[in-house]
Amino acid sequence: MTDDALCTSNFVFHDAAGNVYLGQAAHCTATGSPMLLDGCLNRSLPLGTPVRVAGATRPAVMVYNSWIAMQERGETDLSTCVFNDFALLKLDPADYPSVNPTVRFWGGPSGMVPSSFERAEAFGFGTTVSQGAVSSHAKRGVSLRQGGNGWTHVLQFSPPGISGDSGSGVLDGQGRAFGVLSTYTPRRGVNGAGDLSRMLDYMRASGFSDVNLAQGTEPFVATAQPRQDLVGDLLNGLLGGLLGPAR
């Protein structure tokens, strides 16, 4: 754990060398104001920062952060600066055998899609901490539209994503990954999810060209009620509850 706050991881990634990663929101390691969302201005903890993953035997290490990458590259596009909110955590090899890339509650991901259309179904999950125990809960809603020149998806979730849910993954009605939960607007009850395909393209252009999304081992099923989660506490930690400095 870095500091004492909570974020939620999104998807599992892997590379050609067999390394295994978790995705999270870049703002989860912010050192400045949590209200400052411009990743070209706000600061992050450095690469190499250890992050404790609930259920893992050893800390993960932050190896990529879009805020750091944008500042190093001198990014000036406002939409990119505000909505490119992605970080990559490399798990310790000792924890690889415990990882399953299947999205909690829903199954999948069955691949990735670069966009969503108005009123498209959206599926996700969040994290709850009660009396020191970390658990996950399902979310279901719609993607209202895309904004920020395609960099973000505006979501209406039930329940809405709140503090602690930052970084969680979003699937479309076919189980394809398309977003990473980043912001919440209380007055409107809506969330913003960064476009995963764009954020991964930026990451690959920044030196992680062979890192790819891992597909789930169970099929996506958009049931009326999310299926019971039987994965257990360890995978809850690895896929659903990522302990780190969330905002």
Image (cartoon, rainbow, N blue to C red):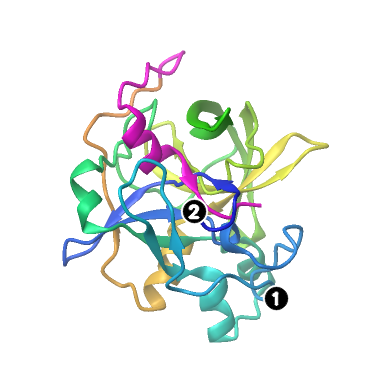
Instruction: Name the residue located 27 percent from the left edge and 49 percent from the top edge.
Output: 214
Percent of width and height locating residue 125: 50, 33
**Which span is picked out in magenta?**
223-247
Q: What residue is disc 1 on? A: 41
**SS state under label 1:** loop
Q: How crowded is mark 1: few (under 14 residues within 10 Å), some or many (20 or more)?
A: some
Asked if residue 184 shows in the view, the reply is yes
Q: Is residue 59 left or right of residue 193?
A: left
- Which secondary structure dominates the residues rendered in magenta? loop
Instruction: Relative to 111, say whether 130 is above or below.
Output: above
Write down the quadrant of residue 103 in the picture: top left
Q: Residue 1 carries which label?
A: 2
In terms of depth relative to the viewer, which is nearer, 21 or 213? 21
Q: Is residue 243 magenta?
A: yes
**What's the amino acid at mark 2?**
Met
Percent of width and height locating residue 13: 30, 55
Instruction: Name the residue located 21 percent from the left edge and 57 percent from the top edge.
Output: 93
Q: Which mark is residue 198?
A: none
Pick whichever of labels 2 and 1 is earlier in the sequence.
2
Q: Does the magenta stretch include residue 21?
A: no
Instruction: Relative to 59, say whether 155 is above or below.
Output: above
